[in-house]
């Protein structure tokens, strides 16, 4: 595929993602529209099911990289809630004036792990100067885009802190979001990948090689906020449900930590 075709395909994928919330917003009898980081798929779906079981309309969930979601919001997406995988993109949306004042709160936390395909015998101790480049050989390191996507930024920070980023930066296979990076490892297209612990837990096709030290990257927090564009009557109720003991227990069951 030529570079021009690749660009066109990428543009169409982004356009589809950007228009999806608007299409959903027009659906009658829907629940509040939630734009959530890709790593929250299983947990947020479980939370939406639990909310619907209480007699509410099930929230409509749209998942993507936090950077893509933030850009959708700033472009006027008529969503109700935003859950980012880091504070930077929530800060960006807040500075632009798109948050309902007083509704921002930390929902959950996570850990960063190195994964390999389930049947691949990779032994690597995570620590300063670790031999990750040698472990990769001629293969690639799958990561969410380290320039913009939270999981990728955390990963680059960790590898930099451990002194090995220069040795692997040219071997990085960049994905649009953390689930894209996970998929590359699942398919064997990358020998190693950096994802959240909850992503690894959600897949039977990868195994955790090791966990990055908490001090090697900024704390992983998922801030939640209601958006000024929100008009759904259940938006605030669902936000409070997510932050309640019941809601937090759902995320804990899926491996998320306290924020």
Image (cartoon, rainbow, N blue to C red):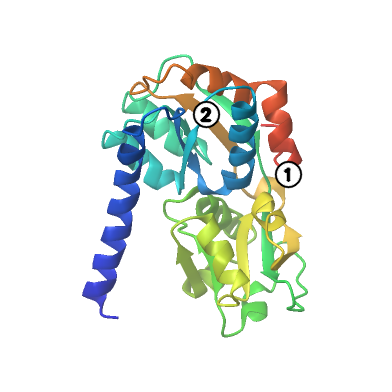
Residue 44 at x, y percent in the picture: 59, 38
Q: CA distance from mark 1 to mark 2?
A: 18 Å
When the figure is inspected, residue 183 is found, relative to residue 55, above or below; the finding is: below
Residue 197 at x, y percent in the picture: 69, 52
**Image label count:** 2
Q: Left or right: where does residue 210 sit relative to residue 243?
A: right
Instruction: Say few, some or many: other residues with alpha carbon within 10 Å of mark 2 (under 14 / 14 to 19 / 20 or more).
Output: many
Instruction: Say few, some or many: other residues with alpha carbon within 10 Å of mark 1 (under 14 / 14 to 19 / 20 or more).
Output: many
Residue 249 at x, y percent in the picture: 74, 31
Q: Nearer the viewer, residue 88 or 18?
A: 18
Mark 2 highlights which residue?
Answer: 224
Q: Residue at x 55, y 77 (%)?
A: 189
Q: Left or right: where does residue 94 sit relative to residue 237?
A: left
Q: Nearer the viewer, residue 6 or 247?
A: 247
Quarter of the view holding residue 185: bottom right
Q: Nearer the viewer, residue 143 or 65?
A: 65
Q: Can residue 220 be seen in this snapshot?
A: no
Q: Residue at x 59, y 74 (%)?
A: 187
Which quarter of the figure is the C terminus placed in? top right
Q: Residue furthest left?
A: 4
Q: Residue furthest top?
A: 102
Mark 1 highlights which residue?
Answer: 255
Callout 1 secondary element = loop
When the figure is inspected, residue 237 is found, relative to residue 148, above or below; the finding is: above
Q: Left or right: where does residue 30 sit relative to residue 229?
A: right
State which tag comes first along the sequence, 1 or 2: 2
When the figure is inspected, residue 25 is found, relative to residue 115, above or below; the finding is: above
Callout 2 secondary element = strand
């Amino acid at each position: 595929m030529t570079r021009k075709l690749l660009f066109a395909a990428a543009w169409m994928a982004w356009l589809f993602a950007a228009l999806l919330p608007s299409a959903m917003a027009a659906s009658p009898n829907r629940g509040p529209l939630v734009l959530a980081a890709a790593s929250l798929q299983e947990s947020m779906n479980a939370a939406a099911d639990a909310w619907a079981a209480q007699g509410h309309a099930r929230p409509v969930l749209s998942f993507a990289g936090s950077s893509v979601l933030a850009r959708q919001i700033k472009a006027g997406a008529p969503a109700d809630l935003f859950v980012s995988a880091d504070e930077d993109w929530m800060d960006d949306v807040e500075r632009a004036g798109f948050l309902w004042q007083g509704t921002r709160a930390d929902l959950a936390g996570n850990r960063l792990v190195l994964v390999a395909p389930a049947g691949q015998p990779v032994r690597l101790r995570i620590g300063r100067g670790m031999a990750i480049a040698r472990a990769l050989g001629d293969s690639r390191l799958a990561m969410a885009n380290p320039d913009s996507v939270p999981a990728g930024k955390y990963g680059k920070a960790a590898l930099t802190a451990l002194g090995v980023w220069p040795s692997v930066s040219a071997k990085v296979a960049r994905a649009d979001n953390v689930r894209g990076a996970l998929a590359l490892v699942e398919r064997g297209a990358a020998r190693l990948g950096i994802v959240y612990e909850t992503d690894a837990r959600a897949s039977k096709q990868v195994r955790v090689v090791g966990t990055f030290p908490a001090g090697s990257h900024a704390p992983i927090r998922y801030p939640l906020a209601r958006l000024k564009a929100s008009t759904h009557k259940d938006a605030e109720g669902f936000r409070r449900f997510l932050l309640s003991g019941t809601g937090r227990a759902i995320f804990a069951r899926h491996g998320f930590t306290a924020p």
